[in-house]
Amino acid sequence: MTEAEARAAIVREARSWVGTPFRHAARLRGAGADCGGLLLGVYSAVGLLPEGLEVPIYSPEFMKHRGDEWLLDLVEKYAHRVDRAPLPGDIVLYRFGRCVSHSAIVTAWPEVIHAWGTAVVPDDERNPALAERRVGVWSLWPCPA
């Protein structure tokens, strides 16, 4: 699969998760997902992550009590930070509390899909609740030449 095909597949898959209820530590389309579960579910379904990837057990409010960067570390096992405009299929990370604790999938910048509030929803990254907390953008692919 080419990079363009993979990016398009990520966006299609992410859009198919819209409406999935928010459920802490879940990653099953239609049944429940949190922001990390959404990443794992989407990228696994497209074949870019191993199925059943293990994540540490975490509290719904881990970002208030702990500073370890387990979500950032997990993303950085498969992706790298980029200093360019986000492309479809890239990952945006956000800091809420003491550490990186939220993620979204870019569909068409500044549009993203993430597990937010009560469900997986499309959103606009210009939403101040997101933009003010953005840490950066990560990609599974090298920077374009």
Image (cartoon, rainbow, N blue to C red):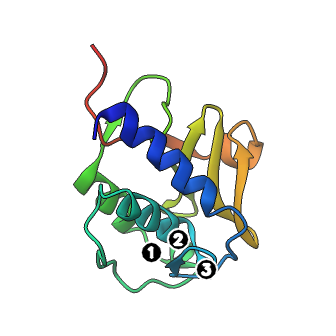
Residue at left 43%, top 22%?
84
Crowding at label 2, few (<14), some or many (≥20) Cα neighbours within 10 Å? some
In the image, what residue occupies the spot 30% across and 55% down?
48
Q: Amino acid at mark 3?
A: Gly
The reply to whether residue 6 is visible in this rendering is: yes
The answer for how far apart the CA atoms under marks 2 and 1 are is: 6 Å
Mark 1 = which residue? 66
Measured as percent of width and height from the top left, residue 41 is found at 45, 68
Q: Are marks 2 and 1 in contact (CB under 8 Å)?
A: yes
On the question of residue 132 being in view, the answer is no
- Where's the C terminus, which quadrant? top left
Residue labelled with disc 3:
32
Mark 2 lies on residue: 63
Query: Which of 47/114 is in front?
Result: 47
- The image shows residue 60 at horizontal and vertical percentages of 57, 81
Q: Secondary structure at mark 2?
A: helix
Q: Amino acid at mark 2?
A: Met
The kind of secondary structure element at disc 1 is: loop
Q: Which one is nearer the viewer's eye here, 24 or 45? A: 45
Instruction: Give whichever of 60, 35 is nearer the camera.
Output: 35
Could you tell me how far apart the alpha carbons at marks 3 and 2 are, in whole angstroms? 21 Å
Name the residue nearer the viewer: 8 or 98. 8
Q: Nearer the viewer, mark 1 or mark 3?
A: 3
